[in-house]
Amino acid sequence: RKEVEQDPGPFNVPEGATVAFNCTYSNSASQSFFWYRQDCRKEPKLLMSVYSSGNEDGRFTAQLNRASQYISLLIRDSKLSDSATYLCVVKHGGLERSSASKIIFGSGTRLSIRP
Amino acid sequence: DGGITQSPKYLFRKEGQNVTLSCEQNLNHDAMYWYRQDPGQGLRLIYYSQIVNDFQKGDIAEGYSVSREKKESFPLTVTSAQKNPTAFYLCASSPKTGFTEAFFGQGTRLTVV
């Protein structure tokens, strides 16, 4: 089983629609959670961090459920420019001086917004 | 400007040759990572390092080697033992502790010819 699993996609939705992605993680010791966006043939870039209480950034809302070990991303009023691959990212370890922090990526969910 | 620099952007290698990908950061980050991405796939962890002269294998370390002689540098060598090396390679760095994200270089596209 993969450490981080995402909805496979692709999602093809009309402009203005609301779309949600889910992601599950297997390591209960995971400490930090993020959503990254990756455009075609480019490096991933941070979209938003995910906090325990949930957080919102404009049209984007991220939620974390530690008990069920999943995180979600909601995009409201989607724009053509939102078309990209969205990567769920989990970080664990590194809290002790001798331990290495490990950052694991999900395989990504492709989103395509149509006019 | 602070950031991560990967070079070269494109690299062609003949079968049977070793090749080294460069990754340099001036963000003063302790942790550095190498990922491989195949077309239409997610990122898979090759190696990661927390401190100088120390590194750990990721999920797909076979056929790769790394070194961490300086905090700023984490080069990746793709050896002839890697059977299918054609891919997009991404280097990232992050502060060791704390709930902070990873920052990426622009990647190196390696093609075996």
Image (spheres, coloured by chain):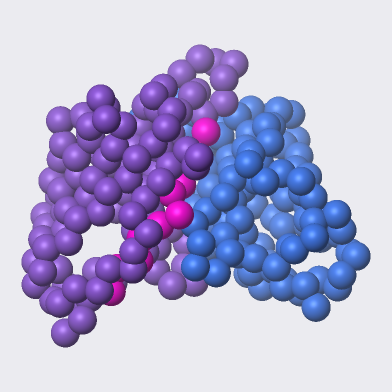
Chain colours: A purple, B blue
Can residue B112 be seen here? The reply is yes
Per the rendered image, the range of residues in magenta is: A102-112
Residue placed furthest toward the right: B16
List the single residue furthest toward the front: A1
Residue B72 vs residue B81, the one in the foreground: B81
Magenta stretch mostly in which secondary structure? strand
Residue B74 visible in this rendered orientation of the protein: no
Residue B27 position within the rendered picture, expressed as x and y whole percent measured from the top left: 50, 42
Q: Which residue is drawn at 57% across and 60% down?
A: B37
Residue at the image position 52 percent from the left and 29 percent from the top:
A101
Q: Residue A1: x, y in percent?
A: 50, 40
Q: Is residue A71 above or below residue B88?
A: above
Looking at the picture, how far across and down is residue B107, in whole percent? 57, 62
Choose top left, top right, bottom left or bottom right for residue A7: bottom left
Q: In this view, does B65 lie to the left or right of A31?
A: right
Q: Looking at the picture, does residue B82 appear above or below residue B31?
A: below
Does A83 sit left or right of B57 as displayed? left
